Image: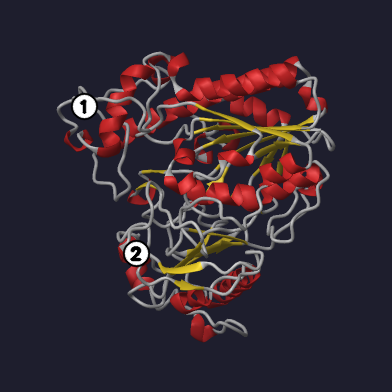
Amino acid sequence: MKAIMVMFDTLNRRMLSAYGCEWTHTPNFQRLAERTVVFDNSYAGSMPCMPARREIHTGRYNFLHRSWGPLEPFDVSMPEILKDNGIYTHLATDHYHYWEDGGATYHTRYNTWEFFRGQEGDPWKASVKDPSIPPMLENHTKGLRRQDWVNRPYLNREEKQPQPQTFQNGIEFIRNNHQEDNWFLHIETFDPHEPYFTQQHYKDLYPHDYNSPHFDWPDYKRVDESPEEIEHVRFEYAALVSMCDHYIGKIIDIMDEYNLWEDTMLIVNTDHGFLLGEHDWWAKCVNPFYDEVIHTPLFIWDPRSKAIGKRRSSLVATIDLAPTLLEYFGITLPASMQGKPLKETVQHDQPVHEGVLFGIHGGHVNVTDGRYVYMRGPKQPNNAPLFEYTHMPTHMRGRFSVDELQDISLAEPFDFTQGCRTMRIPGRVWSEYAPYKTMLFDLLNDPHQETLLLDDEVELRMAQLMFDLMRESDAPAEQYERLGLPLEGEVTREHLLAREQYEEALKVR
C-alpha cells in the first residue's frame, strides 16, 4: 500500500473550476476531479496554519485548548505512527513555519524530509543593506515585507521558486520508490498563500488594466482599497492558483506514468481558504470564518473502491485525514483521535459526522451541520476567561514572553494528554480587531452568508450540537463560561445569543 497527500496552503475552493469557478484557469484540478472523489462539504477545523497541521497529525481539534504551537509531547502523530508500523514516510515542503519556534516538532515525525526556502518572509537570504523596494511600498521596509523583497531576486526563474522545487522533490521520491511498497509521501507547498508572487506567464492568463501601486500582499484587515485594486489582487491570487494547477498536473502525470492508481491513495487538500474582498475583508484570521475561508476543497482517490469522478455531500473535516490514512494502511486508530476514516464515505457517501467544529483559539467557536453555520461569540465583552494548555509555550515565531509566564498553574490531565498535566497559561486572541459576535447562517438559502438568520429553534439545535462536540473534545471548563454555555446538562433558550447580539453583529459584518 502507498499513499500520497498533496497539500496546498490557503487554497480557496471557489477559485477552482472543479467547484464551479468559470474564470480561473485550473484544467488540472478539473482533471483531478475526474480521477477522484470530490467532497462538497469538507471543512477546516483549527485555524490557521500550524493548528491545522496539528489536526492532520493528531486527528483531533486544536483550537479549544491552545493557539498556534508545536506538537505536544503527549500528542499522537499520524506520520510517526505510520513510521513506527514500518511505513516509510517522507515530507517534501516549502512551508517555512515548520522551522520556527511555533512549529518545530512536526517534520521530525517523518523518516525523512526536505525543505525549500524562500516563501513569504522566510529568513533566508541575508542583506544588511535595504533591498530595492518600490517607493510606494512604505510598509515593506521592515519585518516580513522587507525580507520578502530580499528573497525575491533569488526566485527570478520558475525552477528557483519553492513550489516547483517541492514538487520536483516529491516526483523524485516517486520515481525512486514507485516499485517499492509501504510508503507515505506528503508533498506540501505554501502556495497559494500570500504574497502572490509568481511568474509572468501565469499572470498573462489574467490580463487586465492596472495603474495603481504594486499590490500582491493584502493585510489582514477590513477592505479599504479601490475596486481596481481588489480586482487586481484577485487576479494575482488566481495566477498563483494556476501555478498550483500546473504542478498538481505533474502529480497526475506521474500517477499515470507508473499506473499508481492501482495501489496508491491520493489525497489533495488544503488547510483553509482566503477572503479576497468578500464580506469586505481581506484574509483569514481577524474576521469571522466565512465559507470562503473554512469550506475547503478535498479530493480523494482510494484504490480499494476505485470510485472515480464522483461527488460526495457528507460532512467531513481536517480531523478525518489522519484516521483515513491510518485505516488505509491497516493500523488501529488511537483512542484520542476524533476524526473518522473516510473509506465508506469515499465509496458510498456514508455520513461520519452530524456536525463539525471550527475556529481559532479565543475567537468564535463555530459549528456546522452542512446546512447551517453557527458562529458563537463570547457572552462577556472582555472575552474571558481564556487559557492556553501546553507543555510547549510558543507562538508563531517566538516563545511566550516572560510576562505571559508569570501566572502559570498546572491543569489536571485532559482525556488526550496521556495522564500528563499541562501548563495553564492566561491566553490571548489572534487579533483584537476580530468581531466575535454571535451569528447564524443558512447556507442552503444564503450560500454567500449575506443575511443573519434569527431562528431560535435552529440556534437551539446548533448550540446543543456545539455543546455536545465540545464535550466530546474535553473542552476546558472556562470555554463554556466564556461562551455563556452551561457546563453540564442541556442548552436551553436562556443560553441563546443570536438575538441578544444581533445589532452588534450587523455592525461588524
The CA span between labels 1 and 2 is 32 Å
- Left or right: 349 as drawn, with respect to 157: right
Return the disc, 1 or 2, that comes first in the chain's sequence.
1
Residue 143 at x, y percent in the picture: 26, 38
Residue 216 at x, y percent in the picture: 32, 31
Q: Say which residue appears at 65% left-offset and 64% top-offset.
A: 416
Question: Which amino acid type is marked by label 2?
Answer: Glu
Residue 3 at x, y percent in the picture: 73, 33
Q: Which residue is mark 1?
A: 128
Residue 424 at x, y percent in the picture: 47, 70
Question: Which amino acid type is marked by label 1?
Answer: Val
Q: Nearer the viewer, residue 437 or 79?
A: 79
Q: Say which residue appears at 73% left-offset and 54% top-offset.
A: 340
Query: Does the rendering let one see residue 1?
Result: yes
- Left or right: 21 as drawn, with respect to 211: right
Q: Which residue is mark 2?
A: 404
Screen quadrant of the C terminus: bottom left
Query: Does the rendering let one see residue 228?
Result: no
Q: Are marks 1 and 2 in contact (CB under 8 Å)?
A: no
Mark 2 lies on a secondary structure that is: helix
